[in-house]
Amino acid sequence: MKPLKPFRIFNKAPTVPQVDNEHWYHIKAATKAEGATEADPAPIEIYIYGEIGGWGITANQFIRDLKAIDDGVSPVEVAFNTNGGDLFEGLAIHNALSRLGERCTGRIDALAASAGSVAVCGAHRVVMASNAILMIHNPYTWIEGDAEELRRVADVLDQAFEVIIAAYKAKAPDIDEAELRRLVNDESWLTATEALALGLVDEIGTGVQVRACLGNGAAMAKYRKTPQTLLDQLATKPGEPEAGPATTSEPTAPDPGDSTALALMITQDCAKAGISNLVAPLIAATKLTDKTTVQAALKRAKGIRDLCAAARLPELTAEYVTAGLEPDAVRARLFEKLVSSGKGFEIDNTLPPADDEQETVKAQLPNPTDIWAARRQAATKGARP
């Protein structure tokens, strides 16, 4: 389930840590500056700079890591720069930050979109950079199944919508609910001034460069109303260095001819394997970089399809493929979803048929020698002594 949202506070930390390529958060334990007194406790610093729930790392792990270093006294400052992620992972973070009470301050450094906007509204106080963006929209998911299954998923999405509304209302209790619902339905990209007027943030601070945090705009292009100015900021020019935690520039775009051939390869292979619904996620995940990358992604996608089908959650296949998850991470997510659902689903270990057509079993022709031997043996047993 996707979409989905959260200082004396600096809007940009003096030194921003590098967030690991395969991690979406970084937690730094509180350390007192030289000469600091007990009256000035050092804050615990958290950076959520990536897709919430990505790489198979759940909000449960985030909460465990926070609890491991939280002394119950130190202020907690949570910086956000995320295009979103799993709605319920974002909601779990929202609730975890809310439990910290007045100690917790959220900071939107550049972008808090979708699940990121839900998570940041859990903070007691939210400071938004003057040039940052808060994006709110309806929940969505990928699904395949019969009419009954589609109706069930539609009901779940309706419930998820109400969860989102409740999360925003908890942060801004005086907000006009009819207007809030309209903004969510319309996929709204709110400036700091607009978010402040609605009550979703408490203060506007100094701005930072969006591109310095996200590195590229591929993830943003999937939304319907992404501001062109934001996409322009996120589009890194080849050879142009990036500030902030992102230290590498975007790879050079592949040759158009090669891209067309690779896209065709994905389309044909997916059709052959019966996973045509994964064409778009695979193209997005591989960025049509090269043949080796595409072939590895296709193989991984088929394995993910089999795992999701075995867990009777085929609708999650596209989500996991898009996220670039490895099979072990998919198994962990499926297990967690099945266990936490409380519906008692059983995993069907019978995998779908293999992609390659099974070898036809040929009929055996009669063997005259065997027939003659069998008749002689029967005649011998029936003969009288």
Image: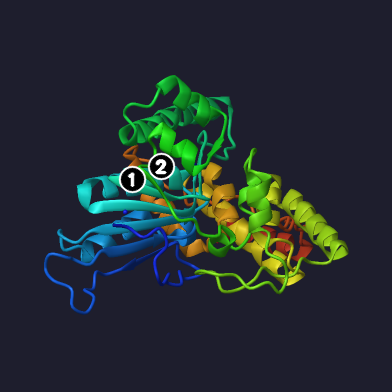
| Depth order, front residue of 34/28 | 34
Secondary structure, mark 1, is helix
| Depth order, front residue of 317/281 | 281
Residue at 82% over, 55% down: 264
Is 86 left, or right, of 150 in this rendering? left
Residue 94 marker:
1
Q: Position of residue 113 (x, y in %)?
A: 50, 46
Let me know if residue 291 appears in the view: yes
Mark 2 vs mark 1: which is more N-terminal? Answer: 1
Residue type, mark 2 in image: Val
Q: Position of residue 310 (x, y in %)?
A: 50, 49
Colour basis: rainbow
Residues at marks 2 and 1 touching, judged by CB atoms closer than 8 Å: yes
Q: Which of the 4 image quarters holds residue 321?
A: bottom right
Let me know if residue 330 appears in the view: no
Q: Tell me if residue 353 comes above or below residue 13 in the rendering.
A: above
Q: Which residue is mark 2?
A: 118
Q: Which quadrant holds the C terminus?
A: bottom right
Residue type, mark 1 in image: His
> Crowding near pointer 1: few (<14 within 10 Å), some, many (20+)?
many
> Crowding near pointer 2: few (<14 within 10 Å), some, many (20+)?
many
